[in-house]
Image: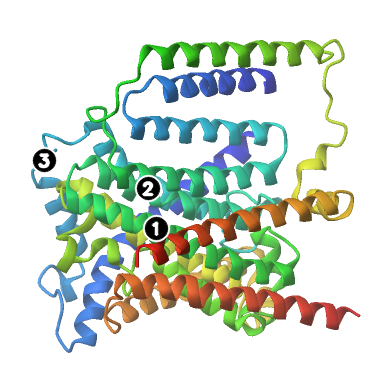
Amino acid sequence: MGTSVFYFVATLSIIFSLMVIFSKNPIHSVLYLILTFFTFTVHYVLLNAQFLAVVNFIVYMGAIMVLFLFVLMLLNLNKENEPNKSNLLKIVGVIAGGCLVVTLMGALKAVNIDSPLVLVDKDLGLVERLGKELFGKFMLPFELSSILLLSAMVGAVLLTKKEEKTNG
Amino acid sequence: MDINFVIEKFLLVSILFAISLLIAMYSTYAERKVAAFLQDRLGPDRAGPFGILQPLADGVKMFMKEEITPSNSNKWLFMAGPGLAMLCACIGTAVIPWGQDLAIGGRVIPLQVTDINVGVLYLFGVVSLGVYGVMIGGWASNNKYSLLSAIRAASQNISYEIAMGLSIIALLLMTNSLSLKEIVLQQHGGNWNVLYQPLGFIIFMICSFAETNRAPFDLPECETELIGGYHTEYSSMKLGFYLFAEYINMFVSSAVMATLYFGGYNYPGMDWVATQLGPIAAPLVGTGVLFLKIFAFIFFFMWVRWTIPRFRYDQLMNLGWKTLIPLAIANIIITGIVIAVVKF
């Protein structure tokens, strides 16, 4: 049952992510992206990573996508006033995408698929275990990444303040 | 899977859904009665004794009205908006423990749809999804006022979610658990969290006012500036869904506050009552007590609405970012220090 659910949800993820690219209206794109993230949440639940699932739910679906929608609505982007992309840009896009596919294929080839992945510890994704791992074994990288995020935040605030001053 | 399990969960979900709708219905009546009481009026008193049939009359009116879809709106999203608002309002009840386990004929039936071990975070996720109904509906209406209101709602929700999350963190430091069932069990015997986390509770409550778009933070529906806000273009039952969703949100956040801070279904003298009434009636008394607490909170929501005027937009943002968030962080630090001192 687990695998059939996985294939069903995986198909949905792929369909929704394709819709993100193919829909003309940017708002529709973002809405499809939200659905894509929702299917990711389901994937995490299937992997018994409840904490990650819920955090993905809150942070990506609940906060980041709301901000995306917010900005799009504020800018009021429509397909009418979307700048026409030149053919050169399209070709460059295709080449870049192709390169990404080749890289991914190469990376996947390197993975040893013969030995099936087995979840060693079923409770690994639960919040208590995850917290102990993060604040024990991975203390330094965890704190460093939090400092990185904080500095990005401070930088963003600083940039807006600077603009205010020059504008008078 | 056990067939009994499926039946009892199905029953519980249906009952909860019915209760949510019923409470939302009678909240509209209660709101008007409370407003009347606070303003020294009578309120609705024509339909039935004391106007008790007024919600039914309103419901019939909502259904009978003409359904208008603006010609330049986005049809699908215009429909999805109210539906999404309603869905997000209703799914919050799933993780709240409504009472102690019932023991009927050797079967133990928990009065909670599911006890996931990240229950608090789940609630938080539901809250953060709630804004989509408003945003999508407001944008799809293709109306400047609706759009402005949708944007207001989004920024307000995001701002207050942060303070709300931080106030919960201080609580979680004490409870050491994310499961709502566990949190309620810990509050047994008058050990209510509000006694240890008064500041956290006040911050949480203010944020839930903002998250449910209730006065004094109902800026997305500010009539003087935005006509009707995000539901300007809505009519008939779609409008009804938006209004209903607000009342269900109010009910759910009252339930959450009662559960997290006011002991849930616990009440003084519980163990004595349990020995007197037996294993079936006693949990139901607890459920009744929980609902009394919820009604008290709903009354408080209404009381505040008819007492405090609406905030200005910059005041709202200042309160959220410059007062509540620093206070919540200070609360976390103090809680952490106290816990460290008590432990060692």
Chain letter of the residue beneath label 1 in the structure image:
B
Chain letter of the residue beneath label 3 in the structure image:
B
Q: Amino acid at mark 2?
A: Phe
Q: What residue is shown with label 2?
A: A70
x 64%, y 41%: residue: A53
Q: Amino acid at mark 3?
A: Ile
Category of crowding for the residue at label 2, using alpha-carbon neighbours closer than 10 angstroms: few (below 14), some (14–19), many (at least 20): many
Category of crowding for the residue at label 1, using alpha-carbon neighbours closer than 10 angstroms: few (below 14), some (14–19), many (at least 20): some
x 59%, y 21%: residue: A10
Q: CA distance from mark 3 to mark 2?
A: 26 Å
Q: In the picture, residue A3 is in which quadrant?
A: top right
* Residue B155 numbered mark, or none: 1
Q: State the image coordinates of residue B161 (x, y, percent, origin top left).
A: 50, 61
Quarter holding the N terminus of chain A is top right
For the question of whether residue B1 can be seen, the reply is no
> Left or right: where does residue B65 sit relative to residue A25?
left
Q: Nearer the viewer, residue B82 or A76?
A: A76
Q: Nearer the viewer, residue B332 or A94?
A: A94
Quarter holding the C terminus of chain A is bottom left
Q: State the image coordinates of residue B119 (x, y, percent, origin top left).
A: 62, 54
SS at mark 3 in the image = loop
Q: State the image coordinates of residue B242 (x, y, percent, origin top left).
A: 28, 52
Say if mark 2 contacts mark 1, CB within 8 Å.
Answer: yes
Category of crowding for the residue at label 3, using alpha-carbon neighbours closer than 10 angstroms: few (below 14), some (14–19), many (at least 20): few
* Residue B174 numbered mark, or none: none
> Left or right: where does residue A125 sit relative to residue B205?
right
SS at mark 1 in the image = helix
Q: What residue is shown with label 3?
A: B68
Which of marks 3 and 1 precedes in the sequence? 3
Q: CA distance from mark 2 to mark 1?
A: 8 Å
Q: Is residue B183 positioned above or below A132 on the image?
A: below
